[in-house]
Amino acid sequence: MLRWEYALLVRRRQAVSDGIGWEVTFHWYGPDGTMVDVTPYGDTALSHLNRAGDQGWELVSMSEDPSLPGNHELHRYHLKRPKAQLAPRQRVRGAGRSGRRGITG
């Protein structure tokens, strides 16, 4: 059965903390629960989405949070990719059985 893993790319436009102006930041929330600032990898959402696509991620949906005050923006890009398949467990036959069947002639 095909299983999926999910990730989230968040784009924020926020006030610069040490001066006047705005900055755009990108954060990646991975399927393992980690959060990474990926802003240095690109300055547009498309550059980040193309990078994720190269790693097998597919864009599922995009949402914007209009409830933020002022000029703040928050965009969420929801992504998924097939989960790596684990090798099937091998069954050990006959281990621990007392009554083994054999070929009789």
Image: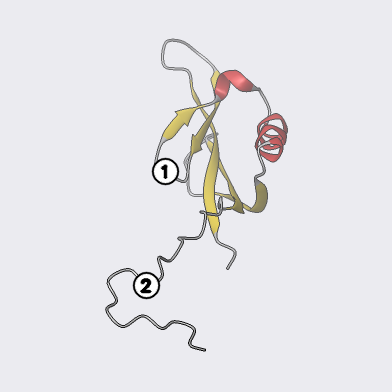
* Badge 2: residue crowd in 10 Å (few <14, some 14–19, many ≥20): few
Question: Residue 28's spot in the image, x, y percent?
Answer: 51, 35
Q: Residue at x 68, y 32 (%)?
A: 51
Looking at the rendered structure, the kind of residue marked 2 is Gly
Q: Mark 2 falls on what kind of element?
A: loop
Marks 1 and 2 close (CB-CB < 8 Å): no
Q: Quadrant of residue 89?
A: bottom left
* Badge 1: residue crowd in 10 Å (few <14, some 14–19, many ≥20): few
* Residue 65 visible: no
**View extreme (bottom): residue:** 105
Q: Mark 1 falls on what kind of element?
A: loop
Name the residue that disc number 2 marks: 94
Q: Quadrant of residue 18?
A: top left
Query: Nearest the camera: 89 or 2?
Result: 89
Question: Residue 41's spot in the image, x, y percent?
Answer: 62, 21
Q: Residue at x 59, y 64 (%)?
A: 2
Name the residue that disc number 1 marks: 32
Figure check: 64 above or below 23 = below
Measured in 3D between alpha carbons, the distance from the residue under mark 1 to the one under mark 2, in whole angstroms, is: 38 Å
Looking at the rendered structure, the kind of residue marked 1 is Asp
Query: Looking at the rendering, in which quadrant would you find the N terminus?
Result: bottom right
Figure check: 101 above or below 35 = below
Question: Residue 38's spot in the image, x, y percent?
Answer: 54, 26
